[in-house]
Image (cartoon, helix red, strand yellow):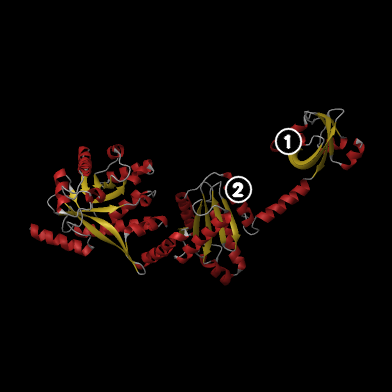
Amino acid sequence: MSTPTLDRVLDAVFRVDGRFDIKFVSEKGQQWLAATASVTLPTSFLQLVCADDVDRFCQVCDATPDGFSCDIRILRNDELCWVHVRGYRLAAAGQFVLCLIDISNWKRDELAGRHAAEHDALTGLPNRVFFKRAVEHQLLSGTGRFTIAMLDLDGFKKVNDTFGHAMGDAVLIETAKRLTKIVGPQDVFARLGGDEFVLLMADADLAAAQARARGMLLAMARPFETAPHNAYLGVSIGLAQFPEHGRDCSVLLNNADNAMYHSKNAGKNRVSVFVPKESAVDFSIQTAIHNGIQEGEFYLDFQPQYDLNRRLIGAEALMRWKGQDFGQVPPDKFIPIVEESGLMPFLGTWALRFACHQLRQIQTLMPNFIMSVNVSPVQFGAEDFDQQVLQAIAECGVSPASVVLEITESTLMHSQERTERALATLCKHGIHFSIDDFGTGFSSLAYLTRLPVSSIKIDKAFVRAIEDEHKASPTEKKLVTAMINLAHSIDLEVVAEGVENESQFAFLKQSGCNMFQGYLLSRPLSAAALTHLLEQQTKVSA
């Protein structure tokens, strides 16, 4: 095998020593590399090799030193090109002969073919093959939770059937552009076919995924100028999270697809989270909740609150739901589903507005009447929560000082910086805050003294333990007394809920409790019944 013969067949021939220092380059190889008097070759062959390929090239050489072959990238005319390298050992000289063939055109065709096989021709997005490979890579990486979102356009078939496939294609392209702009840099957004898209949200927990999905709803809310009459198309989204909703790609995709169809059945243009089969009844309730909102099945009852003298001075607004299919559903059953489905910000704002509207009517009878409204952690976490509250109060024309927002201890512990900022803003406008279910969460003197809280509400579980001298434990009574004394020591008022008998009322009154609510004094009332009760009290006082 002579060098001149090789020089006619190959693009370049190198002879290098054991450290890959260049000892000889064929004449054709110098021409191929464009080496001239002004452009000299480096001293080492490895200096020509792309930095990302050096380790792989050396590993191949070490593994089969007598003869090896591999594809690497070489720097040629300041550009990288693909070459196929075959190496032969010259044992006597302690050197290697490296024979190079330029395969850039082959690689280009290969990569183009691979791209075509893994990408959607219409939108340029990755396709199902690419997406599955990305999910499998995420599973193997072991980086923890991630979420898959399945998306399907609402009303696309009508556009396609009415205006033709060309118009439908334009809508799909515009959809891909809109949603690509809002996905994260580590996410993978793909088109599965038709009007179905899918998103892999790497390292995203369910709350973050839901927020991202709601952003997609907003992105799709704008009219499609590509369609006649600026058509509006929504998108139904289903979420499935690893590992809770599946531990392999096919199961996760299937469960996200099921959640997406639930969004379709629940009214479209919404986000749903997959619910395991053992909790399939939640899907039915979730659908009924959506229908209930549209049909006006949600309403408020009011739990009267009394002072030491059993005088009605305020009320707590309580959300209620009487569904057409499920009848009266208890709050502890439907509220978690409302929160999970992303509807709590809407229902919470509605409840606040309704309560403030009722407060305005009641204050014509008693100007100092106080209305307490529960705030969900999900609702409180909204960026514009403080503005929503102030707007509702302003629209109803009530004094901010007559509104008490009840928040849980867990709410205070979540997103503390944002929580403190929202509390401070609302407190400046005169709104009061009460810690609901005090003693059942993360009770801490730190946040009681740091945050603008005006009262605490002793959970009914502690009140229930106070029966009479024979049944109640001395420790339980001491604990309740300690809570009241603690609150008073930092100028907080105390509300006791769940007061059901005279023994409990007497003990709490003696311990210094400021306000009371419970079945002993009154059950929850409708707005009309509460107004009537206040009218009766006003007449007696007069």
Examine the rendering and report whether any part of residue 445 can be seen.
yes
Callout 1, which amino acid?
Gln
Q: Secondary structure at mark 1?
A: helix
Q: Secondary structure at mark 2?
A: helix
Q: Quadrant of residue 253?
A: bottom right
- Answer with left or right where residue 524 lies relative to residue 100: left
> Are there few (<14), some (14-19), or many (20+) residues within 10 Å of tag 2?
few
Examine the rendering and report whether any part of residue 234 can be seen.
no
Q: Residue at x 28, y 50 (%)?
A: 405
Hey, which residue is sitting farthest bottom in the picture?
162
- Answer with left or right where residue 425 lies relative to residue 254: left
Residue 339, image x, y percentages: 39, 55
Looking at the rendering, in which quadrant would you find the N terminus? top right
Looking at the rendering, in which quadrant would you find the C terminus? bottom left
**So how many labels did they put on this image?**
2
Q: Looking at the image, is 231 positioned above or below residue 316?
A: below
Q: Looking at the image, is 210 positioned above or below residue 284?
A: above
Q: Looking at the image, is 309 positioned above or below residue 162?
A: above
Hey, which residue is sitting farthest front in the picture?
470
Could you say which is closer to the camera, residue 151 or residue 241?
241
- Answer with left or right where residue 307 lies relative to residue 259: left
The residue labelled by disc 2 is 137
Callout 2, which amino acid?
His
Could you say which is closer to the camera, residue 400 or residue 508?
508
Q: Quadrant of residue 165?
A: bottom right
In three-dimensional space, the C-alpha distance between marks 1 and 2, rounded to whole angstroms, equals 24 Å
Residue 82, image x, y percentages: 76, 43
The residue labelled by disc 1 is 59
Task: Determine which of the numbered discs, if any, sits on residue 338 in the image.
Answer: none
> Are there few (<14), some (14-19), or many (20+) residues within 10 Å of tag 1?
few
Residue 403, image x, y percentages: 25, 51
- Disc 1 or 2, which lies upstream in sequence? 1
